[in-house]
Amino acid sequence: MDFYQVGNLPLVSGETLLDAQVAYQTLGQLNATRDNAVVIFSYYSGTHQRYLPLIGAGKTLDPARWFIVLVNKLGNGVSSSPSNSLLQAGAAFPAITLVDNLHAQQQLLFNHLGIERIALAYGWSMGAMQAWHLAVAHPSQVQNLLAVCGSARCWPNNQVFLAGVRAALCCDAQFAGGYYQQPPLRGLAAFGRVYAGWAYSAAFFREERWRDLGFASLEALLVDWEQDHQALDANDLLCALYSWYHADVGQLADSDWRAALGNIGARCIVMPCDSDRYFTLEEAELEVAALKQGELRVLHSPYGHCAGAPARFAEESAQIDSAMQALLLTR
């Protein structure tokens, strides 16, 4: 993993992120024409490492052919975040949007790494939201886009979900408005437990699909979600949540999301899951309708939003890989 030193980054809010840095990893080599880059963006509570199982010799993402760049978004605990900032730690960390992320990421990709054209911009969930932003901002440089269970803007239903998990975390008195001395474990546990109810589908719970994941009971699954989030920093979670909540590619086109999507020059495959509770199929259909070259490939799965997680479910992962091949191997 490497760090690109952005320096002081002016933000949409009017504030400045001091000494900003973007953490990233590259695999493979940029070719002579500088057009074999595959850029993959981290999702909400994940880092670049979660995508590594997709990459390797003989796989669609083979470093012998592609220059693969794994990018960590601001606020994920690896790139500049409330938990690791020396100058703006904790609650003093400024509000970050995906447009702010874009401004830092395009410096990394085009200035620092010297990429001229991007063969594929890809991500799951909040990673897809970042890929959408890059495709809108660089219509002639992003050739292909694969957005898995992630929209170009945060729709109202999605915002309601986010407001709920945020409220669960902030209700812990120990959170203290972000100025906590010890991790607000009760709030983090509540955040995780509430989140679990949205991450999967009604069928997942009705059919006891949690057994597929190795859990002996529904309660065991919920406790796992609690513990998983207790290991994360509360201010990091809320920083990234703010970026997600306020995401909208329309910010790049005079507040017109349809116009923004219409400007994309890339071939796009959009892959919602039919049982996703917050990145919904209906809203994916609205976004695809605004594209010049948009194809909707629906994941039919009981795993809800998690159906699109990289290398998590075999059948769904095979469909995502097939879409990736359709974009990369027919350039």
Image (cartoon, rainbow, N blue to C red):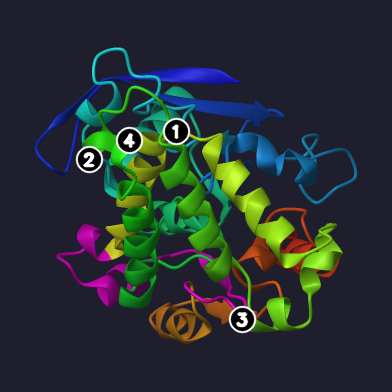
First in residue order: circle 2 vs circle 3: 2
Give 194 or 37, whichever is nearer the viewer: 194
Q: Secondary structure at mark 2?
A: loop
Q: Is residue 277 magenta?
A: yes
Determine contact: label 2, label 3, CB under 8 Å.
Answer: no
**Residue placed under numbered mark 3 in the picture:** 275
Quadrant in the picture for residue 207? bottom right
Residue displayed at 81% across by 58% down = 215
Mark on residue 254? none
Determine contact: label 1, label 4, CB under 8 Å.
Answer: no
Mark on residue 233? 1
Task: Residue 30 in the image: state x and y as whole percent.
Answer: 63, 30
Mark 1 → mark 2, Cα distance in angstroms: 16 Å
Give 66 or 157, whichever is nearer the viewer: 157
**Residue placed under numbered mark 2 in the picture:** 95
**Which numbered mark, 3 or 1, is in the foreground of this view?**
1
Q: Residues within 10 Å of mark 2 (few under 14, many from 20)?
A: many
Task: Residue 98 in the image: state x and y as whole percent.
Answer: 33, 48
Determine contact: label 1, label 2, CB under 8 Å.
Answer: no
Task: Residue 324 in the image: state x and y as whole percent.
Answer: 71, 61
Asked if one can make out residue 28 in the rendered structure from this viewpoint, the answer is yes
Left or right for 188, reference 323: left
Q: Secondary structure at mark 1?
A: loop
**Residue placed under numbered mark 4 in the picture:** 174
Residue displayed at 63% across by 28% down = 26
Q: Amino acid at mark 2?
A: Ala
